[in-house]
Image: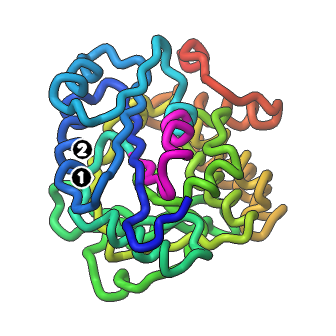
Amino acid sequence: MNFAGTKPPVGVVIVNYNLKDSLRETLVSFRQVNYPGLQIVVSDNASTDGSVEMVRQEFPEVHLLTREKGVGYAKGASLGMEFLADRTKYIFSTTNDVLVDPEMINALVDHAEAHPEAGVLGCKIYYHDKGDLLWSAGGRMHPLFAHSYHYGWNRHDAPRYNAVRECDFMTGCGFLFPSAVAKKINYFNADLVFYSEDADFCYRVREQGYKIVYVPAAKMWHKTSTTLAKNRPTQLYYSTRNNLYLTARHQVGWYPLSLWVNLFVVCPAKMILLGLFTIQNARGIWLGIRHWRENRYGWADDGWFR
């Protein structure tokens, strides 16, 4: 594709499951983005709350991918990426619980065009309705504990968060990447279903020789804990299992020490602390460990947590 003298085509993938009202706000936000020819795809995971009908009626410009059965976040996003990959130079992958700055795509694309070594470009992300309180200014994996954390988390915005920076990963809440790179690494790992698919994607992009870059001029706002996080045992299962996969697959931090510390210190501590609320939390973590050891991925059975 030759885009000389024009803005390169960009597609946006928004994964949705039963968040009609929040999705509407997200789509309205993208309608206000100042970027020519922006192509929006909603990849819906068999919603039953009227989301599909709402998109068809209120946002006819949006391409809607529907299915009769949910396939998880990672696969849902990948299907949207596949749809856009041959139509656009860049793809912005995001969720149904964000609002974006009108200049966000311009800021990301301008940096990507000037820095072709950047394989994933992420945003400065604020909490929704909490002023200048930051949710993420780029992601890191702790070298000893092999646990993810965000720069700036729960801190007010400040000049130190205004510098472009290389990171270990960018949160899948919203990041841009070249379509060709996504095709080369075969998109998100669908076996992870939820959690760590973004970090795994970033590590695989880095393996291709690219950098993971935080671009503070690109701003967005995130409504936290809107979907899976409400089901704590299931969330702990996926996050535990997939984080262990990520650590072993990519030899994160001071590997293998980081893996042993995570497995024998971090996980047991979480089981004890979170198990005080309900034993099902501890069970979710234990099953995550067990299924990682058994190399069992894909969907969790809700019956496991009862």
Question: Residue 163 in magenta?
Answer: no
Q: Residue at x 59, y 46 (%)?
A: 197
Q: Is residue 8 left or right of residue 129?
A: right
Please state the extent of the stretch shown in magenta in the rendering: 79-94
Q: Residue at x 50, y 57 (%)?
A: 89
Residue 127 appears in the rendering: no
Q: Amino acid at mark 2?
A: Thr
> Residue 45: image x %, image y %?
43, 23
1 and 2 marks in contact (CB < 8 Å)? yes
Neighbor class of circle 2 (other Cα within 10 Å; few <14, some 14-19, many 20+) is some
Q: Nearer the viewer, residue 287 or 137?
A: 137
Instruction: Report which residue position mark 1 lands on.
Output: 99
Q: Is residue 167 left or right of residue 126?
A: right
> Residue 14: image x %, image y %?
38, 40
**Rendered position, 176 above or below 245:** below
Q: Residue at x 81, y 36 (%)?
A: 293
Instruction: Report which residue position mark 2 lands on.
Output: 26
Q: Amino acid at mark 1?
A: Leu
